[in-house]
DNA sequence: TGCTTGACATAAT
DNA sequence: CATTATGCCAAGC
């Protein structure tokens, strides 16, 4: 079974509301542990009108990924706040409270 | 079909 | 905390 973008989208689509997941976590759930780069690259290929909750995907530091440009980062933060995620003064939030737990 | 590119993670410096 | 180096591999050209 080869993993491509589609499998990554499937996993991200399963992220419950008011929860977030790291790239590494998604990669693991998608069957490609350690390949966090695949996740990020898959998201980069997403369209602006996609149905994938890409805003629930963050890096291992519990922060919004510093993608190219800065306007999109603001959007992601707004979308997360609308779901109940509360950001720290450092632009982070408690992964222990908001990270998606599959257990 | 061979090379370059990446919304990352981890460790070392 | 910022920078550098390495792992890993599909997508795009």
Image (cartoon, coloured by chain):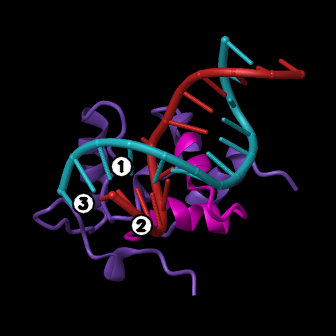
Chain colours: A purple, B red, C cyan
Counting residues from the start of the chain, the first of labels 1 and 3 encountered is: 1
Residue marked by disc 2: A20
Foreground of the two, A49 or A46: A46
Q: Which residues are magenta?
A: A17-41
User: Which mark is nearer the camera, 2 or 3?
Assistant: 2
Instruction: State the separation of the CA atoms marked 2 and 3.
Output: 11 Å
Q: Residue at x 32, y 44 (%)?
A: A66
Whether pointer 2 and pointer 1 mark residues with C-beta atoms closer than 8 Å, the reply is: no
Relative to B6, say whether A32 is above or below: below
Relative to B5, say whether A101 is above or below: below
Asked if residue A4 lies left or right of residue B11, the reply is right
Residue A7 forms part of the magenta stretch? no
Residue marked by disc 1: A65
Considering the numbered disc 1 on the image, is that residue within a helix, a strand or a loop?
loop
Residue marked by disc 3: A81
Subunit under mark 3: A
Q: Quadrant of the N terminus of chain A?
A: bottom right
Q: Position of residue A67 (x, y in %)?
A: 36, 39
């Amino acid at each position: 079974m080869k993993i491509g973008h589609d499998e990554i989208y499937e996993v991200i689509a399963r992220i419950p509301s008011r929860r977030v997941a790291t790239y590494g976590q998604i990669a693991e759930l998608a069957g490609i542990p350690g390949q966090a780069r695949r996740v990020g690259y898959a998201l980069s290929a997403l369209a602006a009108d996609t149905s994938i909750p890409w805003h629930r995907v963050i890096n291992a530091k519990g922060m919004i990924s510093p993608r190219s440009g800065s306007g999109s980062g603001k959007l992601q933060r707004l979308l997360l706040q609308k779901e109940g995620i509360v950001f720290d003064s450092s632009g982070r939030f408690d992964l222990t409270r908001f990270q998606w737990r599959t257990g």
